[in-house]
Amino acid sequence: MRIEHVEKLTAAELSGSDFSFDVEEEAVAPFDGPTLSRTVPVTRYTKRYELEADLVETTDPAQSLIVVARSDGQVAGYILVSRAWNHCAQVDDFAVARSHRRQGLARALMDEAVRWTRERGLQTIRLETQSNNVPACRFYERYGFRLGGFDRYLYSAIPSQPRPEVALFWYLRVSPSPPSGS
């Protein structure tokens, strides 16, 4: 497994990897954090995301980060992070291929995001996921993220949703890196 910082990530690079996940339970209100308080079982289905032609291109490494994990030439996982308007680091996208889950790859990618955040003197990482992605929510909880809010209408206009989804917002406080020479 090779983890590398890259300047661009495209849908073509991701096309050979399966980033779908199975939904067997969903988080339900109340979403008053700091962790998920309740989940309910649902009829199992698979969630797939459509990939955009060009996901992202980094033009300024001080403002954004793209980290890709590759195995045998295929993308095994990636994380996209940017500096948000409110001086937080924001995880814009994050995925691990099915064939590489539960091997520590998500943690390794998130560690890179934390390192980048600290190096820039930012103190918080923010990300959003959906109420039907309970495995991701559990990972964020184990990593130390706290549930900070929700939006039940964010996905309501998407016609292809099999079930209503609630956007869940997670936050991780990080300590900035000490100044050089300390």
Image (spheres, rainbow, N blue to C red):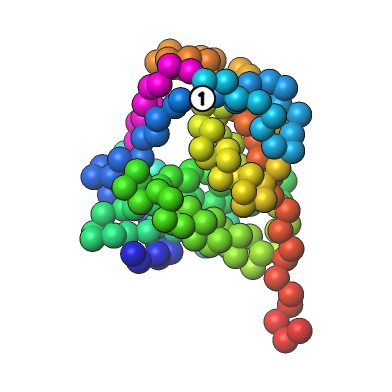
Q: Quadrant of residue 148?
A: top right
What residue do we see at 52% from left, 20% from top? 41
Quarter of the image for the C terminus: give it: bottom right
Say which amino acid is labelled 1: Glu
What residue do we see at 28% from left, 44% from top? 17
- From this view, report whether residue 46 is shown above or below residue 156: below
| Crowding at mark 1 (Cα within 10 Å: few <14, some 14-19, many 20+) | some
Residue 104 visible in the shown view: yes
What residue do we see at 29% from left, 60% from top? 71
Q: Nearer the viewer, residue 4 or 87?
A: 4
Q: Nearer the viewer, residue 55 or 38?
A: 38
Q: Which residue is mark 1?
A: 25
Quarter of the image for the N terminus: give it: bottom left
Residue 103 place in picture, x, y as percent: 42, 56
Residue 152 place in picture, x, y as percent: 63, 19
Residue 54 visible in the shown view: no
Residue 89 place in picture, x, y as percent: 63, 51
Dot 1 falls on a residue whose secondary structure is strand
Q: Is residue 75 left or right of residue 140?
A: left
Picture mark count: 1
The magenta segment is 42-52
Toward the front, the furthest residue is 41
What residue do we see at 60% from left, 45% from top? 140
Q: Is residue 164 left or right of residue 123?
A: left
Q: Nearer the viewer, residue 99 or 80?
A: 99
Please tell me whether residue 72 belongs to the stretch shown in magenta. Answer: no
Q: Nearer the viewer, residue 132 or 24?
A: 24
Q: Is residue 101 left or right of residue 112?
A: left
